[in-house]
C-alpha cells in the first residue's frame, strides 16, 4: 500500500499542492484528475522523486520512504512520461535493458530475456531492433510502459497516457492498464479525460486548483 500524507509543494511562493492525502491499495488503480495547472504532474513528480516536496510523508508497505533516495527508490516507482522520453539513439530492446543493466546490475543476458518477454506481453514481439523513430505513437507508448516494467517497480505511474495518442487508442491503453492490474501491478494515472479515468479507476483523486 502507498500512503501519502500532507504533501505540500509551492513554486516561487505560489502554493500548488496543499495537504494532499491519499492511499492506494496494492494492485489498485488511482486516477488523479483536476483542471489544467492544478498540479497533477507536480504531484506525480513529487511522488516519483523527480521534484522535491516541501513537506509530506510517503509510506510504502508501512515503511516511511523518501522518493529522492535514489539507491532505495530504483525499484519502487516506474514512470511512463507523457511524451514517452524514449532514448532516441537506442533500439527498443536497448531502451528496455539500459536501466536493469546499469542501475540494478542485471546481466545483459538476463535483462534481454526479460525485455523480450515484456515486448511479447505488450504485443511488440518483432520490434526489438527498431529505433523509436520507426514506431507509431501507440507503439512508443507500449515501449515506454515495457521499459518502466523492466525495473519491476512496485508502483507504475503515468502522466496523461492517452493525450499523445489517437482517440481510438484510448480503449487500448485502458485495456493495457487493466491487464497490468490483473497481473497485480499498482498504478497511478494522471489524466484530464474523465471518461477514461472512470473506466479504469478503483479510486479517484481530484487535485484542486489553488490561488
Ligand atoms: N518547475 C516549475 N517551476 C515553477 N512553476 C512550476 C514548475 N512546475 C510546474 N509549475 C507550475 O505549477 C502549476 C501546476 O503545474 P502542473 O504541470 O503540475 O499542472 P497539471 O495539473 O499537470 O496541468 P496539465 O493538466 O495542464 O498538465 C502550474 O501553474 C505550473 O506553471
Ligand atoms: Mg500535467
Image: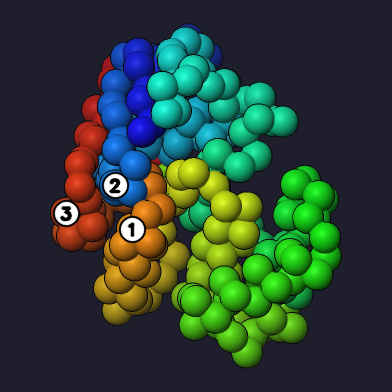
Q: Is residue 34 found left or right of 128 in the rendered image?
A: left
Looking at the image, what colour scheme do you see?
Answer: rainbow
Q: Is residue 170 visible?
A: no
Residue at coordinates 82% horizontally, 60% vertically from top-left?
A: 107
From the viewer's side, name the closer residue of 142 and 17: 142
Q: Is disc 2 in contact with disc 3, using a CB cutoff of under 8 Å?
A: no
Mark 3 sits on what residue? 198
Q: Work out whether mark 3 precedes mark 1 in sequence or the reverse, and give the earlier one.
A: 1
Mark 2 sits on what residue? 28
Quadrant of the image occupied by residue 23: top left
Residue at coordinates 47% horizontally, 20% vertically from top-left?
A: 63
Q: CA distance from mark 1 to mark 2?
A: 7 Å
Q: Which mark is residue 181?
A: 1
Q: Is disc 3 in contact with disc 1, using a CB cutoff of under 8 Å?
A: no
The image position of residue 9, as x and y in percent, is 45, 17
Q: Is residue 108 above or below residue 22?
A: below
Q: Quadrant of ligand 1?
A: top left
The image position of residue 186, as x and y in percent, is 38, 47
Residue at coordinates 44% horizontally, 65% vertically from top-left?
A: 164
Query: Please, what secondary structure does the residue beneath circle 2 have?
Result: loop
Residue at coordinates 65% horizontally, 76% vertically from top-left?
A: 116
Query: Please, what secondary structure does the residue beneath circle 1 have?
Result: helix
Q: Residues within 10 Å of mark 1 (few under 14, many from 20)?
A: some
Q: Work out whether mark 2 precedes mark 3 in sequence or the reverse, and give the earlier one.
A: 2
Amino acid at each position: 500500500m502507498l500512503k501519502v500524507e500532507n504533501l505540500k509543494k509551492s513554486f516561487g511562493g505560489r502554493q500548488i499542492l496543499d495537504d494532499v492525502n491519499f492511499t492506494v491499495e496494492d494492485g489498485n488503480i488511482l486516477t488523479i484528475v483536476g483542471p489544467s495547472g492544478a498540479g497533477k504532474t507536480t504531484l506525480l513528480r513529487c511522488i516519483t522523486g523527480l521534484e522535491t516536496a516541501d513537506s509530506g510523508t510517503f509510506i510504502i508497505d508501512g515503511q516511511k520512504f523518501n522518493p529522492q533516495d535514489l539507491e532505495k527508490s530504483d525499484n519502487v516507482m516506474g514512470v511512463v512520461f507523457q511524451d514517452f522520453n524514449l532514448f532516441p539513439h537506442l533500439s527498443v530492446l536497448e531502451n528496455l535493458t539500459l536501466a536493469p543493466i546499469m542501475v540494478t546490475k542485471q546481466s545483459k543476458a538476463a535483462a534481454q530475456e526479460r525485455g523480450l518477454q515484456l515486448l511479447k506481453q505488450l504485443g511488440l514481439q518483432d520490434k526489438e531492433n527498431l529505433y523509436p523513430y520507426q514506431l507509431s505513437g501507440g507503439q512508443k507508448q507500449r515501449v515506454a510502459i515495457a521499459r518502466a516494467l523492466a525495473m519491476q517497480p512496485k508502483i507504475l505511474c503515468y502522466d496523461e497516457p492517452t493525450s499523445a495518442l489517437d482517440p481510438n487508442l484510448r480503449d487500448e491503453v485502458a485495456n493495457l492498464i487493466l491487464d497490468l492490474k490483473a497481473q497485480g501491478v499498482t498504478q497511478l494515472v494522471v489524466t484530464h479525460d474523465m471518461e477514461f479515468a472512470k473506466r479504469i479507476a478503483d479510486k479517484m483523486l481530484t487535485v484542486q486548483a489553488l490561488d
